[in-house]
Image: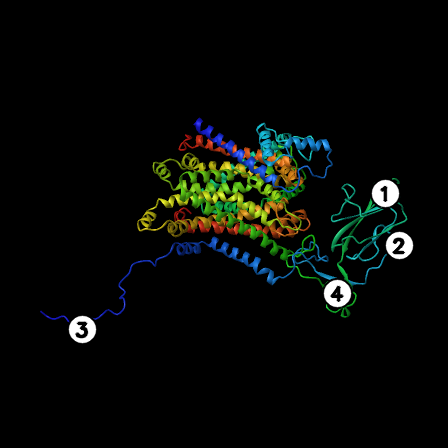
């Protein structure tokens, strides 16, 4: 018998790789991420969401304009509006220019945003005049609006308008009054193009020119830049959109996160306890579901009572959490009940896993996908709710900007300055759309059954 | 069957009680005193109102008084509009909201089923893309923007044609109702279209459709008899919540189109802090919604033979 010595054996160097036929092992989340990446719409939505977050968080650093600051030179200016002003002498009172040839209603001087000076001759049979200013040409068949001046005799045949003048075209109308001071159907109208002007003192006060000595009358100065224009109080729209995004997204993301969290805790507790406790807890959830949502949002808002200077963001979030948790709770409870009966739970129990371990390691991770999808779909509806409530004046209190309250302000001037409505509405729509599509994508990616069913 | 309905109605009453309780305590929490408002009130009026609602009594007594009045169907008298009962206000303004709501649900349901079926039929072809694009718009554009824009386009249309195609605002005739109802039902229509589409696609790949095809049933008959009838069931289920969403979501449309509905009245009452009107409207709406959902569930039992209505 041969002796087998140890020297005739030699250890294999390392692990010899034999042929392996297997895909790399993928975790649930890796797999979902891969599937999400193939979904172009969801991916684009994800980029939009990231862009929005950057806009909200980094935007104010790049565009550090105070959203509450008013630029009274530029009120309700659309984006890309002409923002030059011509320097004129300081204002001096004017009492009509004597000796001008009378030829109906006319401008005594070039119309500027400092003053519009009108002169006219007595209209036929008039014993007084009224002056109106309108945005559109208006004849006697329509109402003139509110007069800006009224003269009950024919002594004064000039008028100087200095009230809230904006560059652009306006229509001035002089209407004859009869002996009793009532308007007659005789009138005269002229279009007036107002030019934006400023004085040296004003311009240097607002920091538009650095050195007042180097500027002369008749020079042009550039006013402050507003990339997206200004609102009806002359506030920078871009800065307000950023500040509004902070409020809208804070409510839109914060509230869903909180009520989903509460729903998960409530639902998993109920599902895990089962029996009487479960029945009682779920019956209570049914009651909360039955509360008419929008009415109670409004009710809670007044119940909290927003004091002066408060924005009302916090009460709105609390109201959402109080009213919206049951849907998640139901969902999570159903999931927990399903998982509880699965083989791997019994296996873990047989191996001696404790209850906390089961919940933490098996139950919650297995519901996480559903919960994530719920949060994603809850965000757009929360943003809508905020916008809706702010729109009817029951949400975030002014002057705190939110996209909803900005739309509310913008819709009043929709015809003359549509950009004040367009931008906040665009941001609401884009955000809601992005989160909806992302939610669709996440649902498809996380739910294995949804893969084949479109 | 009857037992099921009775059970549901009983549960409904308990739910309404819960809503009333939540409303009462929420309103009780409102800072201030319901009798303090701009209007000067005589001492007698004040004393009478205090006695009626037990405002000088502890909360528990007030709550019992509130429940007792509620059980009698007495929502009280408006604090802002003197001598006007909340019941009268509801009776006058709710029918307006209800008609508007019913009309929008009809719009939403017919539109949703129709467009959903169309998109599924023309899956991944032009009509599908077109309708789904509109659906996405309908879901993501806020209702107030849609309302304002539709009103604006009506104005332009009327001016362009020189006569009134549809009135721009107001209430009274069927013509006044069409546009607001369409706007109000739009987001629900979009939602139902999506639902109907996925439900149709699911039905299309089902065994019974394949069987019907293989035994030579004509496609139109498969479509009407097998696909549509089965695919419509999930849509019916969500109609209950949809009615709820539509009837309470009417504020904006009622505001924009100047419709004298209960939603607009509710917003006004909140602005004026008219306690009884706020509480009455909320409880009334809550009860309406609860019983609407029960009604839809019961109807569903008749529509779908697979659902049995036994307790």
Q: Is residue A127 visible?
A: yes
Determine whether, in the image, residue A300 is placed left or right of residue A215.
left
Q: Chain of mark 4?
A: A
Q: Nearer the viewer, mark 1 or mark 2?
A: 1
Residue highlighted by disc 3? A7
Which of the two labelled residues, at mark 1 and mark 2, occupies the earlier sequence position?
2
Which of the two labelled residues, at mark 4 and mark 2, occupies the earlier sequence position?
2
Q: Is residue B182 visible?
A: no
Q: Which mark is residue A101?
A: 2
Which of the two labelled residues, at mark 1 and mark 3, occupies the earlier sequence position?
3
Please rate how many residues cluster around mark 3, counting C-alpha atoms within 10 Å: few if below 14, some from 14 to 19, many from 20.
few
| Marks 4 and 3 in Cβ contact (< 8 Å) | no
Which of the two labelled residues, at mark 4 and mark 1, occupies the earlier sequence position?
1
Q: Which mark is residue A177?
A: 1
Q: Residue furthest top?
A: B2
Residue B58 place in picture, x, y as percent:
61, 36
- Say yes or no: labels 1 and 2 on the same chain: yes
Q: Which mark is residue B243?
A: none
Q: Chain of mark 1?
A: A
Query: Considering the image in quadrants, where does the N terminus of chain A appear?
Result: bottom left
Alpha carbon distance from label 1 to label 2:
23 Å
Q: Nearer the viewer, mark 4 or mark 3?
A: 3
Q: Nearer the viewer, mark 4 or mark 1?
A: 4
Q: On the image, which quarter does residue A67 sit in?
A: bottom right
Is residue A170 placed above or below B251 in the rendered structure? below
Residue highlighted by disc 4? A204
Which of the two labelled residues, at mark 3 and mark 2, occupies the earlier sequence position?
3
- Say yes or no: labels 4 and 2 on the same chain: yes
Front residue of B116/A225: it is A225
Picture residue at 52% right of the left edge, 40% below the top: B189
């Amino acid at each position: 018998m041969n002796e087998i010595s140890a020297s005739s054996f030699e250890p294999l160097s390392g692990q010899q790789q034999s042929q392996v036929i297997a895909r790399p092992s993928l975790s649930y989340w890796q797999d979902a991420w891969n599937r999400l990446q193939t979904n172009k719409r969801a991916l684009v939505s994800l980029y939009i969401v990231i862009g929005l977050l950057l806009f909200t968080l980094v935007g104010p650093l790049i565009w550090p304009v105070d959203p509450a600051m008013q630029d009274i030179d530029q009120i309700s200016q659309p984006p890309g509006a002409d923002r030059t002003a011509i320097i004129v002498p300081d204002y001096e009172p004017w009492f009509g220019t004597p000796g001008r040839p009378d030829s109906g209603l006319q401008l005594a001087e070039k119309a500027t945003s400092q003053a519009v000076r009108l002169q006219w001759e007595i209209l036929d049979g008039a014993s007084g005049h009224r002056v109106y200013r309108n945005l559109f040409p208006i004849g006697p068949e329509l109402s003139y609006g509110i007069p800006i001046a009224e003269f009950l005799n024919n002594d004064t045949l000039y008028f100087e308008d200095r009230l809230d003048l904006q560059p652009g075209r306006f229509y001035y109308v002089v209407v004859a009054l009869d002996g009793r001071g009532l308007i007659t159907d005789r009138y005269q109208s002229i279009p007036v193009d107002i030019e934006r002007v400023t004085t040296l003192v004003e311009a240097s006060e607002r920091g538009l020119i650095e050195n007042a000595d180097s500027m002369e009358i008749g020079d042009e100065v550039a006013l402050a830049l507003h990339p997206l224009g200004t609102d009806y109080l002359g506030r920078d729209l871009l800065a307000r959109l950023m500040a509004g995004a902070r409020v809208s997204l804070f409510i839109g993301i914060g509230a869903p996160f909180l009520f989903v969290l509460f729903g998960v805790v409530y639902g998993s507790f109920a599902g895990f306890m089962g029996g009487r406790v479960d029945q009682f807890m779920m019956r209570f959830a049914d009651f909360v579901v039955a509360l008419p949502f929008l009415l109670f949002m409004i009710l809670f808002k007044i119940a909290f009572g927003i004091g002066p200077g408060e924005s009302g963001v916090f009460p709105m979030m609390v109201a959402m959490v109080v009213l919206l948790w049951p849907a998640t709770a139901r969902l999570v409870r159903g999931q927990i009940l399903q998982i509880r009966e699965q083989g791997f739970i019994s296996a873990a129990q047989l191996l001696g896993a404790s209850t906390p371990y089961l919940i933490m390691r098996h139950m919650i991770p297995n519901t996480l996908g559903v919960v994530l999808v719920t949060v994603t779909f809850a965000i757009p509806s929360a943003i809508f709710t905020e916008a809706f409530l702010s729109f009817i004046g029951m949400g975030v209190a002014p002057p705190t900007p939110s996209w909803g309250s900005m739309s509310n302000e913008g819709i009043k001037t929709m015809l003359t300055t549509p950009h004040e409505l367009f931008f906040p509405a665009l941001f609401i729509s884009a955000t809601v759309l992005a989160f909806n599509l992302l939610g669709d994508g996440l649902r498809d990616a996380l739910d294995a059954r949804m893969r084949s069913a479109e | 069957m009857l037992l099921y309905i009775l059970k549901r109605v009983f549960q409904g009453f308990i739910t309404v009680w819960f809503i009333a309780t939540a409303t009462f305590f929420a309103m009780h929490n409102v800072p201030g005193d319901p009798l303090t408002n701009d209007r000067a009130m005589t001492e007698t009026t004040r004393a009478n109102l205090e006695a009626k609602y037990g405002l000088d009594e502890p909360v528990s007594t007030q709550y019992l008084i509130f429940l007792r009045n509620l059980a009698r169907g007495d929502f009280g008298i408006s604090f802002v509009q003197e001598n006007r009962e909340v019941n009268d206000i509801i009776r006058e303004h709710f029918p307006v909201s209800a008609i508007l709501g019913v009309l929008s649900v009809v719009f939403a349901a017919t539109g949703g089923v129709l467009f959903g079926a169309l998109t599924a039929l023309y899956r991944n072809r032009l009509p599908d893309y077109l309708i789904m694009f509109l659906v996405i718009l309908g879901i993501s554009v806020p209702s107030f923007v849609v309302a304002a824009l539709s009103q604006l386009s009506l104005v332009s249309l009327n001016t362009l044609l020189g006569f009134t195609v549809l009135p721009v605002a107001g209430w009274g005739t069927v013509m006044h109702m069409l546009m607001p109802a369409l706007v109000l039902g739009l987001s629900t229509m979009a939602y139902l279209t999506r639902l109907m589409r996925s439900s149709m696609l699911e039905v299309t790949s089902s065994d019974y459709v394949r069987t019907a095809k293989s035994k030579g049933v004509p496609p139109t008959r498969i479509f009407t008899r097998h696909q549509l009838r089965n695919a419509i069931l999930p849509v019916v289920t969500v109609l209950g919540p949809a009615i709820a969403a539509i009837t309470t979501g009417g504020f904006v449309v009622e505001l924009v189109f100047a419709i004298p509905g209960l939603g607009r009245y509710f917003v006004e009452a909140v602005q004026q802090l008219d306690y009884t009107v706020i509480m009455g409207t909320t409880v009334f709406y809550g009860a309406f919604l609860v019983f609407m959902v029960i009604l839809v569930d019961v109807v569903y039992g008749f529509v779908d033979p697979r659902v049995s209505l036994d307790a």
